[in-house]
Amino acid sequence: MLLPPGTILQYMYVKERLQRLNPGRFIEIGIGQGQLSNLILNLGWTGIGFDLNSDTLQVAKKINENYIKAGQYSVQKQDWLASKSKSKVDLVISSMVLEHLKPNEEKKFFQKALQQLKPGGILIILVPSNPDAWGIDDEIAGHYRRYTLDELKTKSIKNNFNVLHLVGLTFPLANMTLPISQYLVEKAEKQKQKLSMLEKTKLSGNRNVLYKTAYPKIFGLVLNEFFLSPFYWVQKLNSKNEKSLIIYAELSPRRKK
């Protein structure tokens, strides 16, 4: 399964950061088709994934079949915020989830992460950024907002987390391809604007837009870490650029005095 170039750049960064940690147990919220969970599992972690979409969960199960059979991974079709999950983990991670939540749900997200993280645990969040880039893609996916670096930092601190690491990702490649991306989305998914925010959120993990989320196999020649490595280093050089379209954040629970 070929991933979009921006997603590859994000996952390359997640992998680099996770390689600094000792593997433990994780929870991923909003696993989509399970590629991020697979990356984490490949690094030696064990965990559980939550998602609302039955179709994407089936794909996630197939991708992570060996880990499920080995008892190292499981998936649940459930809203993590409404779940009774109380197990303590070393890592809570979500990619493209927080922007789908209403303000009260956003606050609950941080509260629940606090409850489930072990002492010394880490919360990793990836969210869309740069409000000036708002477009039909956000509307189709069921987003309520795009963040800024300062906004996510302020909200994290307000919700009792220390900010360990906060950077922008995918600049400038995603910015260069954004007009094409918006055109492709409008052409293929314009009808989704009529759906409810919940339905948009459920469907956001298994979108099928040619040349945006789905690619012919021949594109594998360029949609890989080796080919995209120059863009990876450029995104690192631009990690504080407010025009970045993705924010990566590592947070730790604030200790009570």
Image (tube, rainbow, N blue to C red):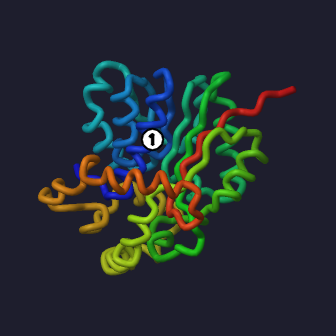
- Measured as percent of width and height from the top left, residue 5 is found at 32, 58
Q: Secondary structure at mark 1?
A: helix
Q: Horizontally, is 161 left or right of 182 in the view?
A: right
Foreground residue among 4 and 65: 4
Instruction: Give the residue displayed 22% in from the left and 49% down from the top.
Output: 1
**Label 1 environment density (alpha carbons within 10 Å; few <14, some 14–19, many ≥20):** some
- Measured as percent of width and height from the top left, residue 223 is found at 24, 55
- Measured as percent of width and height from the top left, residue 43 is found at 37, 27
Q: Is residue 18 visible?
A: yes
Foreground residue among 35 and 7: 7
Instruction: Give the residue displayed 58% in from the left and 57% down from the top.
Output: 240
Q: Quadrant of residue 84?
A: top right
Foreground residue among 136 and 200: 136
Q: Which residue is mark 1?
A: 14
Q: Quadrant of residue 45?
A: top left
Q: Horizontally, is 162 left or right of 72 in the view?
A: right
Q: Is residue 191 visible?
A: no
